[in-house]
Amino acid sequence: MEHMMDITLTVNGTQLRRRVEPRQHLVDFLREELGLTGSHAGCEHGVCGACTLRVDGDIVRGCLMLAVQANGCRVDTIEGLSDSGELARLQKAFHEKNALQCGFCTPGMLLAAQDLILKGGKPTREEIRTHLSGNYCRCTGYQAIVDAIEEVIHGQG
């Protein structure tokens, strides 16, 4: 039997203590152990961005980070950021601009977009596209996603 490790972390504002396998990825821990299925496991190579999470204020790829690496950290998922209202303007703009279709990439896109918004400033469309370049969408062609983010950044959403 594999050696288990104890971790303590704060997920969406709730402190938790769990025993995990050292090789379990953070996104799998959140999905399988906590039932937080909003972040998706897509490519499992850190390329697609579907597993994007926020750890201690920075966005990370949940498929590249092990759960044990989150020991002592604050982890925010799409569920927590949505429930808190932090993403409300972005979610509304995504809906109104038809920036979501199948929805698989949407949680990662929203977290990446919010990360850009929190950095401040008024990025250009090209800068928005560059910031999202690690988040793949097979449905929208990105135009509507950039439109939605631009609307929020420029105070119209």
Image (cartoon, rainbow, N blue to C red):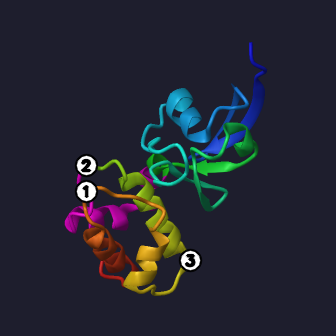
Q: In this view, does 146 lie above or below 75?
A: below
Residue designated by label 1: 139
* Residue situated in front as seen by the camera: 121 or 135: 135
Distance in Å between CA atoms under marks 1 and 3: 27 Å
Secondary structure, mark 1, is loop
Q: Mark 3 points at which residue?
A: 119
Label at residue 128: none
Quadrant for residue 110, please give it.
bottom left
Q: Which amino acid does label 3 sit on?
A: Lys
Secondary structure under the numbered disc 3 in the rendered image: helix
Question: Given this view, does label 1 or label 3 mark the residue nearer the observer?
Answer: 1
Label 1 crowd (10 A; few <14 / some 14-19 / many >=20): few
- Circle nearer the N terminus (1, 3): 3
Q: Which residue is drawn at 33% across and 61% down?
A: 91
Quadrant of the rendering where the N terminus is positioned: top right
Q: At label 2, which amino acid type do we have?
A: Cys
Cα–Cα gap, marks 1 and 2: 7 Å
Q: Mark 2 or mark 3: which is in front?
A: 2
Depth check, front residue: 20 or 23: 23
- Amino acid type at image mark 1: Cys
Where is residue 119 shown, x and y percent of the image? 56, 77
Residue 99 painted magenta? yes
N-terminal-most mark, 2 or 3 = 2
Q: How far apart are marks 2 and 3 (CA)?
A: 28 Å
Q: Residue at x 70, y 26 (%)?
A: 21
Up-down relation of residue 55 to residue 117 (above or below): above
Write down the residue under mark 2.
Answer: 102
